[in-house]
Image (tube, helix red, strand yellow):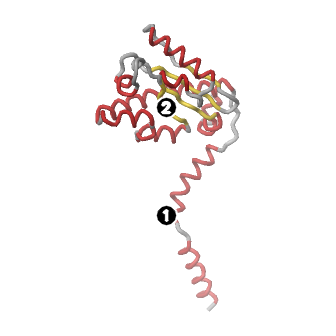
């Protein structure tokens, strides 16, 4: 009798375990554990990672935006203001913990931007007007944020579709990185090398 009762209790215990859910959560748990490992990250490694990610993200975002603009040119204003409406860009924002935006000449007067960013936009605008090639840039805004800027090529369909007014040949990608998110996403094994 005791054996039967023990067997029934064990069987009920096994049935109460949701093994399917446990398998799914294991991958998420492993990913979270890896992200929350204690890591020693130097400022050089942080800046290098943000720069590499910025280059990769702007290339992918630019291709995705051009593809979406070719599909439906009527949505240009909406897509250019809200980059997260493009599925690929939304996935990049989630994966890298970054905010992706497209800025133009009108944003020089944007009060939401830091003074450093406004100065940089003015420099990019001057460069576009003088038809010289400007390079990408990474700036530290404060203790917690990094901003990566990359100019869009002169004459690109992005400039003509997204920007209006006399400076429609000028556009700049703005990627806002949180240092905390960069550190969380970095692989500890790669940092040791």
Residue 49 visible at all: no
Residue 42 in which image quadrant: top right
Which residue: 35% across, 29% down?
A: 66
Q: Position of residue 190 (x, y in %)?
A: 60, 32
Identity of the residue drawn at 62% across and 83% down: 6
Give the labeled residue for mark 1: 20
Q: Are marks 1 and 2 in contact (CB under 8 Å)?
A: no
Viewed as shown, does residue 52 lie left or right of 157? right
Q: Is residue 19 above or below residue 183?
A: below
* Foreground of the two, 126 or 180: 126
Residue at mark 2: 101
Residue 109 place in picture, x, y as percent = 55, 24
Measuring from the top left, give residue 43's x and y in whole percent. Answer: 68, 26
Q: What is the secondary structure assignment of the residue under circle 1?
A: helix
For marks 1 and 2, the one nearer the N-term is 1
Q: Is residue 54 above or below residue 13?
A: above
Q: Judging from the image, what secondary structure is the residue with disc 2 in? A: strand
Considering only vertical position in the picture, is 128 above or below 150?
above
Judge the density around disc 2: few (<14), some (14-19), many (≥20) Cα neighbours within 10 Å.
Answer: some
Q: Which residue is rendered at x = 66% and y = 23% of the image?
A: 44
User: In this rendering, would 157 be left or right of 140?
Assistant: left
Which of 77/20 is in front?
77
């Amino acid at each position: 009798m005791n054996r039967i009762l023990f067997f029934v209790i064990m069987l009920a215990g096994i049935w109460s375990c949701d093994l399917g859910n446990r398998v799914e959560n294991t991958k998420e748990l492993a990913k979270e554990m890896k992200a929350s490992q204690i890591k020693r990250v130097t400022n050089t490694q942080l800046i290098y990672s943000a720069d590499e990610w910025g280059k990769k993200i702007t290339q992918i975002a630019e291709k995705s935006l051009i593809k979406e603009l070719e599909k439906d040119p009527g949505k240009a204003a909406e897509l250019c203001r809200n980059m997260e409406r493009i599925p690929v860009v939304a996935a990049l924002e989630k994966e890298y913990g970054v905010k992706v935006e497209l800025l133009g000449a009108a944003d020089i007067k944007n009060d939401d931007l830091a003074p450093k960013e406004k100065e940089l936009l003015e420099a990019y605008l001057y460069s576009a007007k003088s038809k010289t090639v400007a390079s990408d840039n990474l700036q530290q805004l404060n203790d917690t944020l990094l901003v990566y800027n990359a100019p869009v090529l002169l004459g690109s369909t992005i400039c003509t579709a997204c920007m209006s007014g006399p400076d429609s040949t000028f556009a700049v990608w703005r990627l806002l990185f949180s240092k905390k998110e960069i550190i969380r996403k970095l692989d500890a094994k790669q940092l040791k090398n």
